[in-house]
Image: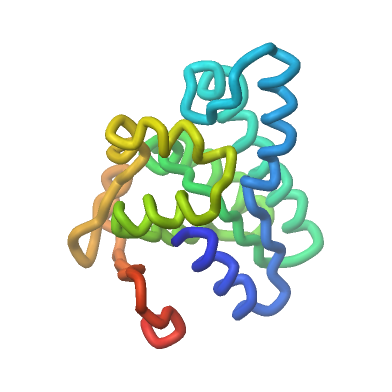
Amino acid sequence: GKTFISKELAKAIEHVVYLDKDTLIGLSKQIFKVAGQEYNRSSDFFNQNIRDYEYEVIVQLALEALDYDNIVLINAPFSKEIRDKGYIDSLKQKLSEKNAVLCVVWVETDIEVCHERMINRNSSRDKWKLENWDEYKPYDRLGVDSESTEILGVEVPCVTIPVRPGRNLAVIL
């Protein structure tokens, strides 16, 4: 899904700085440990004490990277942020100061493909999600059904890339 697409985009673009928010997982695991909390990236503890800081750090790294190269690709869902006009306006302002613009790529993956990939990657970050699948599966999903979507009151062209087993992504792109 998202990670595969973003890595393929990064490979196809010259002079790109690729940042994956999942790189920060090691740090967040340590915060859980020090706080004596069960590792659960869907927990209230994570949402109140870690989540927003991960996004803040990854954006700060991206802004710093723009001082050295002109394209930065962040692999992260930004599912809460994309709905916050104030956040997007602030980000656009920061980017304009670096002579950069915001481009959002939203990847929609069939929920059963997502479930299968979580099982196959066998990652600790997915443990809670898999154990609580019925509660998790509608969580953090926007979904896009048309050729355009409204984000923060602005109609934005939208391309859905159908990611399903047996599909050759190179041919789809």
Q: Where does residue 135 sit, x and y in percent of width and height?
A: 30, 30
The foreground one among 31 and 102 is: 31
Q: Residue at x 45, y 56 (%)?
A: 117
Residue 73 image-quadrant placement: bottom right
Residue 101 image-quadrant placement: bottom right
Quarter in which the N terminus is drawn: bottom left
Residue lying farthest to the right in this orientation: 68
The foreground one among 61 and 145 is: 145
Q: Where does residue 84 sit, x and y in percent of width and height?
A: 40, 35
Residue 50 vertical placement versus 130 (above, below): above
Quarter in which the C terminus is drawn: bottom left
Q: Where does residue 169 sit, x and y in percent of width and height?
A: 43, 79
Residue lying farthest to the bottom in this orientation: 171
Residue 84 vertical placement versus 101 (above, below): above
The foreground one among 40 and 107 is: 40
**Left or right of residue 98: residue 128:** left
Q: Where does residue 74 sit, x and y in percent of width and height?
A: 60, 55
Q: Residue at x 29, y 58 (%)?
A: 110
**Left or right of residue 111: residue 75:** right
Q: Residue at x 37, y 82 (%)?
A: 172
Q: Residue at x 30, y 46 (%)?
A: 142
